[in-house]
Amino acid sequence: MATIWDKRARLYDTFEASDLRRGPAREALFREMTGRVLFVAVGTGMDIKHFPPGREIVAIDISEEMLRRAAPRAQKYPGELRLVRADALKLCFADESFDTVATSCTMCSVPDPQQVFREIYRVLRPGGKLLMFEHVRSRNPVLGLTLDLMTLFTRRNGTAMNRRTVETAIAANFHITNVEPVFLDIILAVRGEKLREN
């Protein structure tokens, strides 16, 4: 998996640039980062400019090349931002060690989103926040089928356009508090939490 993303790193910014008009939605979502933050799949760091200043953030990616390209952006961040090479399928962090976990177009690109959510749940403290900016499968039959067909072609590059990410998070015991459509019902800003045990 790392090899795929190492190869894609050179052109990654070109593809991501088309999504910059959704920057305000990302900024509004990431503004809610509190405490110690884990950002999963930072890529080349295109999201860093949307991070609120003054936070303590650990940003991971499986690709060494992605992290190399993210480094100059991370150095400009006005807060504490550490880049770490790590696999979202098996996070190298202790249980309950983060107050917030955030993602941005991550769940479409991981091979096993259920396992990633299990790992996020493990490292998130009770009462901690889950903040996700993700594209998902539309509930509209025509759009949903279109995304299914697109996935037949995009999957070979490591991307699935038809993930049911909110439902997968709920199945992993996250309490979803808000789902905000950013573009139709395909791009969503999702807020959730790991409930405290009684």
Image (tube, rainbow, N blue to C red):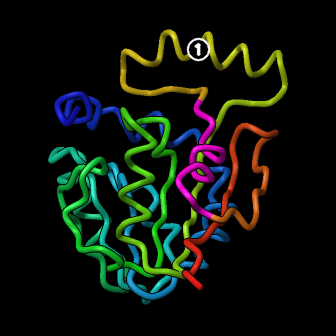
Q: In this view, does 90 lie above or below 140?
A: below
| Highlighted range, magenta | 163-174
Image coordinates of residue 60 in percent, x first then y, are 28, 59
Q: In which quarter of the image is residue 114?
A: top left
The answer to whether residue 144 is magenta is no
Tell me the kind of residue under disc 1: Met
**Front in this rendered view, residue 6 or 122:** 122
| Viewport quadrant of the N terminus | top left
On the image, numbered disc 1 is attached to which residue? 150
**Front in this rendered view, residue 66 or 89:** 89
Please give left or right for residue 27 compared with residue 46 in the image.
right
What SS does tag 1 mark? helix
**Front in this rendered view, residue 26 or 135:** 135
Q: In which quarter of the image is residue 196?
A: bottom right
Which residue occupies 26% across, 34% down?
5
Which residue occupies 63% across, 16% down?
148
Image coordinates of residue 142 in percent, x first then y, are 82, 15
Which residue occupies 55% across, 81% down?
197
Q: In this view, does 188 lie above or below 55?
A: above
Image coordinates of residue 104 in percent, x first then y, are 50, 53
Please give left or right for residue 57 compared with residue 147 in the image.
left
Image coordinates of residue 84 in percent, x first then y, are 19, 63
Q: Residue furthest front?
A: 198
